[in-house]
Image: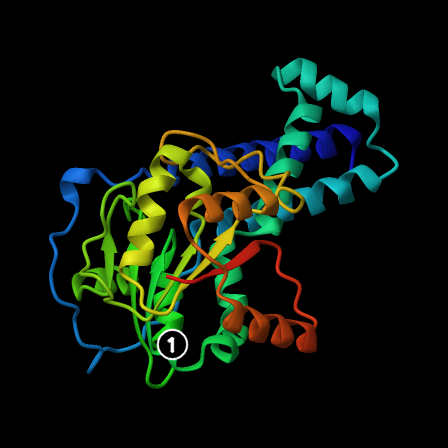
Amino acid sequence: MHTGDRAGIELRLVGLAREACREQGRMSRRSVNPSRRVADGGLPSVGGLLHPKSRSPPVLTIALVVLGVIVLIAYLNSGSGVTVTSREAVSRSEGVDIDKIDALIGQLVNSFLIGSCTSEVIRALPYLKKAYGSSMQKILHVGPDSCTVISDLLKEKKVEAWGVEPYDLEDADSSCKSLVRKGFVRMSDIKFPLPYRPDSFSLVVVSDALDYLTPRYLNKTLPDLARVSTDGLVIFAGNPGQQKAKVSELPKFGRPAKLRSSSWWTRYFVQTGLTENEGPLKKFEEAVAKNKYKPDCQIFHLSS
């Protein structure tokens, strides 16, 4: 293959990656309009519900596209005919800074590979079951991609699960829409009181949500999460040491995520009056150590 041909293919691949980045931006969710919040009411029964397969996150396809682009670019660059000169020629002729786009692709893929705390919930479920036992029979998940978590939980025997999705589900698939239609997943802005009565759930699990709230709203949201739980809260928060590369994450709730340290959260929980749930925490740590599970997110176990 001639140098010009390789450079042309590389340029088209970079264009594909740029389109993937734009698509990721279009698919980012907006926070739910408070006027659309659901009124307080009873919980639906799980009887007769078909357990649909978990929907794939919208970013998965984009990540695969970008990874494919990088592999192909690396292959093209390995050829003896592709030189820095050819890249610069393409950049000048097309007005494209390929080096900057390469860097952007790297950042984007890095953020996908790190993953989200909602996906961490799925990984941690076996250990949460060992730690909380019967408290895992009536669960509320609060956070994005709640349909995925709820679908997975409802596959378990003797488990009732509901979810609160803080963002509009514009890109939801039919399985997720079915959960919303049946009342198992609700769209609700968590900066306002949750649409549930006190002690509605045995356990509340939160992921990818509190990192976007300022202390002003945390002061209201955390007590409200505790209000609807009888046996405690499990909070999955972003780890500054693990997720610094998530630069492509678009702001949610109108502001970027604030990844706080473990010491910050500990001090804040004390100030809020929330204490560590020592019994389940000890069991969770024992199960984690036995299976050599290393979470990428911070996990806090709090009494309600």
Quadrant placement of the C terminus = bottom left
Vertical arrangement, residue 299 with respect to residue 88, above or below: below
Tell me what residue is drawn at x 41 percent, y 50 percent.
Answer: 273
Q: Residues within 10 Å of mark 1 (few under 14, many from 20)?
A: some
- Judge from the rendering whether residue 228 lies leftward or rightward of residue 22; answer left or right: left
- Judge from the rendering whether residue 61 lies leftward or rightward of residue 26; answer left or right: right
Residue furthest to the right in view is: 80
Q: Tag 1: residue type? A: Ser
Vertical arrangement, residue 205 with respect to residue 69, above or below: below
Name which quarter of the figure residue 172 lies in: bottom left
- Judge from the rendering whether residue 219 lies leftward or rightward of residue 43; answer left or right: right
Residue at which label 1 appears: 135
Tell me what residue is drawn at x 57 percent, y 53 percent.
Answer: 298
Name which quarter of the figure residue 164 lies in: bottom left
Whether residue 93 is visible here, answered yes or no, is yes
Tell me what residue is drawn at x 54 percent, y 58 percent.
Answer: 299
Point out residue 52 in the picture as x, y percentages from the top left corner.
Answer: 32, 72
Quadrant placement of the N terminus = top right
Name which quarter of the figure residue 4 lies in: top right
Point out residue 108 in the picture as x, y percentages from the top left corner.
Answer: 59, 39
Question: Foreground: 268 or 15?
Answer: 268
Vertical arrangement, residue 235 with respect to residue 184, above or below: above
Whether residue 173 is visible here, answered yes or no, is no
